[in-house]
Amino acid sequence: MTAIMNRIHEEHREMLPHVKAMRTTAELVGHTPHSVVVSRCEEALQFIQHHLLPHARAEEQFLYPVLDRLERARLGSALLRWDHGEMERHAGDLRGHWEKLVSNRLMTDDVERRVRETLLGLHDLIIQHFTKEDDLVVPLLEANLSQEEVDEIEHDMSVLERRLV
């Protein structure tokens, strides 16, 4: 396993508990106190803002251009970029729902449903995205890049992610 594969797999492993917590939170909506849902939604938003989206931006800037060069058709990276856009859209939806939860102590059935759907949608989207990268992108990169290229991508992604947090 090369450095880039190790790095991507490790980042995904580190983020996975936060992603799984979104599903757990969705399942708790309507069955747990309002304050718990508010707190857990805020935790999800913090994770998205400070970890998931900086990771996505680093991939788009340094990893996907290499993928574009290798696969030529660019469909794979276009689909991965689409995932990132959907993650941002869902995060914006979650932020709007969270703001309603914070300002209103009573959760209506509609707000409960929207929070639940948004969290489940985020969970499923992120899990599928990680799987695409782990199972399709990383092996393609490993088969076609030199260790020097891998090291450069890894370094550049790390620097950008730290700056974005």
Image (tube, rainbow, N blue to C red):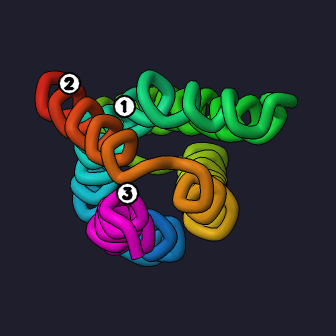
Q: Are marks 1 and 2 in contact (CB under 8 Å)?
A: yes
Residue 100 lies in quadrant? top left
The mark that comes first in sequence, 3 or 1, is: 3
Q: Quadrant of the N terminus?
A: bottom left
Closer to the observer: label 1 or label 2? 1
* Highlighted magenta segment, given as a residue range: 1-21
What's under tag 3, amino acid-wise?
Ile
Is 145 left, or right, of 36 in this rendering? right
The mark that comes first in sequence, 1 or 2, is: 1
The residue at which mark 3 appears reads as 4
- The CA span between labels 1 and 2 is 9 Å
The residue at which mark 2 appears reads as 164
Q: In the rendered image of this protein, does residue 108 appear above or below residue 163?
A: below
Q: Residue visible at 60% across and 51% down? A: 144
What's under tag 1, amino acid-wise?
Ala
- Residue 98 % position (x, y): 38, 38
- Residue 138 % position (x, y): 55, 59
Q: Residue visible at 34% across and 37% down? A: 153
Q: In the rendered image of this protein, does residue 139 appear above or below residue 115?
A: below
Q: Residue visible at 56% across and 52% down? A: 141
- How packed mark 3 is, by other alpha carbons closer than 10 Å (few <14, some 14-19, many 20 or more), is many
Q: Are marks 3 and 1 in contact (CB under 8 Å)?
A: no
Q: Is residue 145 visible?
A: yes
- The CA span between labels 3 and 2 is 20 Å
Seen from the viewer's position, the closer of residues 15 and 137 is 137
Residue 127 lies in quadrant? bottom right
- How packed mark 2 is, by other alpha carbons closer than 10 Å (few <14, some 14-19, many 20 or more), is some
